[in-house]
Image (cartoon, helix red, strand yellow):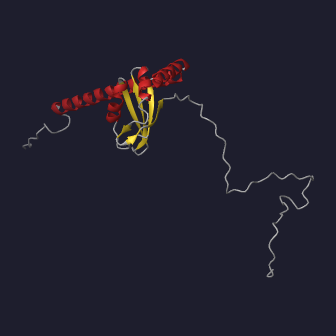
Amino acid sequence: MEHAKVDMAGVEGTPDNNETELEDMQKRLKEMEDESAALREMQAKFESQMASAQDPGSAAATQANREEADSRSVFVGNVDYSCTPEEVHQHFQPCGTVNRVTIRTDKFGQPKGYAYVEFLEAEAVQEALLLNDSELHGRHLKQVTAKRTNVPGMKQYRPRRPNPYMRASSPIVAPYLYSPYGYGKVPRFRMPMRYSPYF
């Protein structure tokens, strides 16, 4: 009886195939360990940021940094919608070294029509205030003022305005212990109507 020869190179369990599978598994294991280390590093960085955000000492430091940056910045109103930060930078360059220009946009990315210009020197703010009512892109820049610092939690309280279309409701004060008209019933006083012969 003759047995047919079988090529053992493609069958599982051969030494060549086992070595390649072992190498593949070691590569995958190494990749997984690298990912795990990267995730641990990212989590540690995130936790340190959260701890610093909750630390009142660092919050005061960031507030002080923000106030210092705002003292070197100006608010610019009536900026043309097609104006780029580079053009605003060029316009305010004669006042001093411009550190950053921020043109505020809405949630769709369209400019809101105002910008903030931050300088490296605080003296440049006084020079920039002189550019109030100057022309940029054919529009006069209005309200070039020193930037104010927002204090968190100090929103200005504005009372509710009365709606002219709503009737004013007055509280009903009953002089009785019980209502003579029934529970929840209130006497209605109708406005005198004009005479109508039909009813």
Q: Is residue 150 left or right of residue 175?
A: left
Using the image, determine if residue 152 lies above or below residue 1. Answer: above
Q: Which residue is situated farthest in the right direction here?
A: 176
Q: Quadrant of the N terminus?
A: top left
Q: Which residue is situated farthest in the left direction here?
A: 2
Asked whether 43 or 184 is in front, the reply is 184
Image position, residue 167 (x, y; %): 72, 57
Residue at position x 88%, y 61% from top?
182
Q: Is residue 199 left or right of residue 137?
A: right
Image position, residue 124 (x, y; %): 41, 23
Residue at position x 39%, y 42% from top?
139
Q: Quadrant of the C terminus?
A: bottom right
Residue at position x 8%, y 43% from top?
4
Q: Which quarter of the figure has residue 73?
A: top left
Using the image, determine if residue 166 lies above or below residue 195. Answer: above
Q: Which quarter of the figure has residue 186?
A: bottom right
> Would residue 172 be seen by someone viewing this image from the given angle?
yes
Image position, residue 104 (x, y; %): 42, 38
Asked whether 128 or 46 is in front, the reply is 128
Q: Is residue 195 left or right of residue 64?
A: right
Q: State how many labels appear.
A: 0
Image position, residue 40 (x, y; %): 40, 25
> Would residue 47 be seen by someone viewing this image from the given angle?
no
Asked whether 64 or 116 is in front, the reply is 116
Residue at position x 82%, y 69% from top?
192
